Image (cartoon, helix red, strand yellow):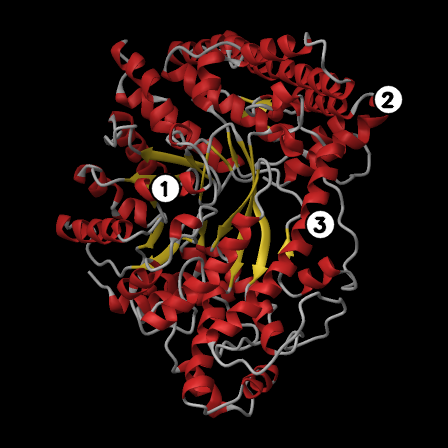
């Protein structure tokens, strides 16, 4: 999918001279139109939906782009020499994200009901406002031009389908092509009227939004079984069969897998304003189609509430889905509480959807930087305990926080820790905000902004104050390792007085070489994930500090959403970090998502879940999947499926927000590691995504195998 970004930027390089003198919103609208005019389109034999684009031979693509050099489609960052505060932070794993073009979810319910012509009318109406500034009108004109481009794309499919129909001898295939052509003449400009039209229109809008940014990463449909249900009912009443609907869904899934691969969420379930379960016939049809597809995408999400039917849970807890790393389970009640915790009113919160990696969003109203900042939670602890310096390396910048020493208890450590974290956060977020605004000014997106609530009214880009909500996800990397280090200090330094803090620092600086006894003592200390009160309390304190800082820095529509989200980068990120004070050696992974440190290998998913439930998870609406592994030998047993359902429901009743279950055995993963060619389609869940096991590095594969081997022994059914 990443090749499309390159092609989009080559179009910019080829045609930008023609658009000299145009406003930047109009320039981007012209670029969007050029892409929609030139992208190769395809309809394949047996297709029921229009939607393939961009695939062609090198020779064909050279005719489109010509011999022009590529240029960046995002603003480059300054070179990292480690001499500025932000560069130093990035070097030490405290990394603000520069820009995010994905991680959004449109309001498909409204889009399908109104059609894009209604949005064009909204723009025209706003242009009549005599009080508009020149800058606002400039952006509105860019929106108008960009929205009009959608018809170029759909009409090209209609032309192609009609041409193919004229040449088609088979009457059934001819009728499919003619239905496709008629839909593309109408959609997405006009409202959809039945299930086929709604799916076709939604996919065209989804593709247009991706093309407008030149990226297909982390773009979701969300509550598909809810906004599509009226169209499903209408088509069913008219005689459309289940087989016909599944055929439509399967092609949608195939196209999402090709273009989006691992990031597009489709969810089932939920509750209404009175708390009634919203599972419907389409929910079950989607589950059936997902089992049949055997694809990575769409990512399947189950919105579980206290009244979720046992029938649906049994359908979701199945070998077909678990072996695909599907689904991800979310607590409906806790997600709603998390949205209210962001300050969103009850009625608006009820319309939330689950987007991309793992966070709830308000469809069509949010821009979300999914990796707003990767926070090395251990760095401020190093500064706290090592007189304002990192354990390894130098500090080339002056910090305002005054160093101190001679701590008497954990309270004093956490107080100083919070001062350092606040200062580091301020440095990172000041840079991030400035870079985002610069990028929105240089590369606006008038098409997607027009589909984002309030952008037309404000005449602004979605990233530059136009959207209702502007969220940045703050990822707390290594929080469990950091908490475990404080727990060890409490025991070994303050209580037993066996070591000094300086001893632990010297040992970590040496990567524990020559400090074997001390290292052994660290490893034997209680840790988060073992369901031990003090260790879990310290994890909660680390995360509470992160949450407090995020919540206190809200400004206007800008929110910082704390998260424990690491995906698979706990391995890659950890490989670049020196030793931590909990006993973790240099290069080892840090804790994964909301789970414990990799040093915790002697506990199973029950203890891990009980520890995770002690945290106030609703404050972490940026995402915090708990990844657990259950050794499943017999998924056909209803008794076993009900056991897993009870585990999920109990976790949610205790306060859990999201749960990811991998049901593969370590033996299967080991065989796939030894003979990857024999397991080309084996998938695992990594906290927000399903990925092919063979896509991982050997180091990441080994981490999976080791973790599964230990955890399945503690919970085998």
Instruction: Identify the residue shown where x is 82% and y is 27%.
Output: 16
Depth check: 588 or 273 in front? 273
**Image quadrant assignment for residue 497:** bottom left
How packed is label 1: few (under 14 Cα within 10 Å), some, or many (20 or more)? Answer: many
Res 431 label: 3
Q: Quadrant of the C terminus?
A: bottom left
Which element is circle 2 on? loop
Secondary structure state at the residue bearing disc 1: helix
Read off the residue under disc 2. Answer: 21
Camera sees residue 180: no
Q: Image height check: is 111 above or below 654?
A: above
How far apart in space, not on screen, are marks 3 and 2 (Cα)? Answer: 30 Å
Q: Pointer 3: residues within 10 angstroms few (<14), some, or many (20+)?
A: some
Residue at left offset 67%, top offset 14%: 144
Residue 29: where, in percent of width, then height?
Answer: 71, 21
User: Where 596 falls versus 358 (above or below)?
Assistant: below
Badge 2 or badge 1: first in the primary sequence: 2
Q: Position of residue 12 (x, y in %)?
A: 77, 30
Among the 4 quarters of the image, the one containing residue 348 = top left
Residue nearer the viewer, 405 or 321: 405
Q: Nearer the viewer, mark 3 or mark 1?
A: 1
At horizontal 38% and vertical 23% (from top left) the residue drawn is 227
Mark before the other along the chain sequence, 3 or 1: 1
Query: How far is the residue under mark 2 from the one under mark 1?
Result: 49 Å
Q: Please tell me which of labels 3 and 2 falls first in the chain.
A: 2
Left/right of residue 286 with respect to residue 696 in the rendered view: left
The residue that mark 1 highlights is 337
Q: Is residue 472 above or below residue 671?
A: above
Q: Quadrant of the N terminus?
A: top right
Q: Position of residue 357 (x, y in %)?
A: 47, 45
- Residue 557 in the image: state x and y as whole percent: 57, 35
Mark 3 lies on a secondary structure that is helix
């Amino acid at each position: 999918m990443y090749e499309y970004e390159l092609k989009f930027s080559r179009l910019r390089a080829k045609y930008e001279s023609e658009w000299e003198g145009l406003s930047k919103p109009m320039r981007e609208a012209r670029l969007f139109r050029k892409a929609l005019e030139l992208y190769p389109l395809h309809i394949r034999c047996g297709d029921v939906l229009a939607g393939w684009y961009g695939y062609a031979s090198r020779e064909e693509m050279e005719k489109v782009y010509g011999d022009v050099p590529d240029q960046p489609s995002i603003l480059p960052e300054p070179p990292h020499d480690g001499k500025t505060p932000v560069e130093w932070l990035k070097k030490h794993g405290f990394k603000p994200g520069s820009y995010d073009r994905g991680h959004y979810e449109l309001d498909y319910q409204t889009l399908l009901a109104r059609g894009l012509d209604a949005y064009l009318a909204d723009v025209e109406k706003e242009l009549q406002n005599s009080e508009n500034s020149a800058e606002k009108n400039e952006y509105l004109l860019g929106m108008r031009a960009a929205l009009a481009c959608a018809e170029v794309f759909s009409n090209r499919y209609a032309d192609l389908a009609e041409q193919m129909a004229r040449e088609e001898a088979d009457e059934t295939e001819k009728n499919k092509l003619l239905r496709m052509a008629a839909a593309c003449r109408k959609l997405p400009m006009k409202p959809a009227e039945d299930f086929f039209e709604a799916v076709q229109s939604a996919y065209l809008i989804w593709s247009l939004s991706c093309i407008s940014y030149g990226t297909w990463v982390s773009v979701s449909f969300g509550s598909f079984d809810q906004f599509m249900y009226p169209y499903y009912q209408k088509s069913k009443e008219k005689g459309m069969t289940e087989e016909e609907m599944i055929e439509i869904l399967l092609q949608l899934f195939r196209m999402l897998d090709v273009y989006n691969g691992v990031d597009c969420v489709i969810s089932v379930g939920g509750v209404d304003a009175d708390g009634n379960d919203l599972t419907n016939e389409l929910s079950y049809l989607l589950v059936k189609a997902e089992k049949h597809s055997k694809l990575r995408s769409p990512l399947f999400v189950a919105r579980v509430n206290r009244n979720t039917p046992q029938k649906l849970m049994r359908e979701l807890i199945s070998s077909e889905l678990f072996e695909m790393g599907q689904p991800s389970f979310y607590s409906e009640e806790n997600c709603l509480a998390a949205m209210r915790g962001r300050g969103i009113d009850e009625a608006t919160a009820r319309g939330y959807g689950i987007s991309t990696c793992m966070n709830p969003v308000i469809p069509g109203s949010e821009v979300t930087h999914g990796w707003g900042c990767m926070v090395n939670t251990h760095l401020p602890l190093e500064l706290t305990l090592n007189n304002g310096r990192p354990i390894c390396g130098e500090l080339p910048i002056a910090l305002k926080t005054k160093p101190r020493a001679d701590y008497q208890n954990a309270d004093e450590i956490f107080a100083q820790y919070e001062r350092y974290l606040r200062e580091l956060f301020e440095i990172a977020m000041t840079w991030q905000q400035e870079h985002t605004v610069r990028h929105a000014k240089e590369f606006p997106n008038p098409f997607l902004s027009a589909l984002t609530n309030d952008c037309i009214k404000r005449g602004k880009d979605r990233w530059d104050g136009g959207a209702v909500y502007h969220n940045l996800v703050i990822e707390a990397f290594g929080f469990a390792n950091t908490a475990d280090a404080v727990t060890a200090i409490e025991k070994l330094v303050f209580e037993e007085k066996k070591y000094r803090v300086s001893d632990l620092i010297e040992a970590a600086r040496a990567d524990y070489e020559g400090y074997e006894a001390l290292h052994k003592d660290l490893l034997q200390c209680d840790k988060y994930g073992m369901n031990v009160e003090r260790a879990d309390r310290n994890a909660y304190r680390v995360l509470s500090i992160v949450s407090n800082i995020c919540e206190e820095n809200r400004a206007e529509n800008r929110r910082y959403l704390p998260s424990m989200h690491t995906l698979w980068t706990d391995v890659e990120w950890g490989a670049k970090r020196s030793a931590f004070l909990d006993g973790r050696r240099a290069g080892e992974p840090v804790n994964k998502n909301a789970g414990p440190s990799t040093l915790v290998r002697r506990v199973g998913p029950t203890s891990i879940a009980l520890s995770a439930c002690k945290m106030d998870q609703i404050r972490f609406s940026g995402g915090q999947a708990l990844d657990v592994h259950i050794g499943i030998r017999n998924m056909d047993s209803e008794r076993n499926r009900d056991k897993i359902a009870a585990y999920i429901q109990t976790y949610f009743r205790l306060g859990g927000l999201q749960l990811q279950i991998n049901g593969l055995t370590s033996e299967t993963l080991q065989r796939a590691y030894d003979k990857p060619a024999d397991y080309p389609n084996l998938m695992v869940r990594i906290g927000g995504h399903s990925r092919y096991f063979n896509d991982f590095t050997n180091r990441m594969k080994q981490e999976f195998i080791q973790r599964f081997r230990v955890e399945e022994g503690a919970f085998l059914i």
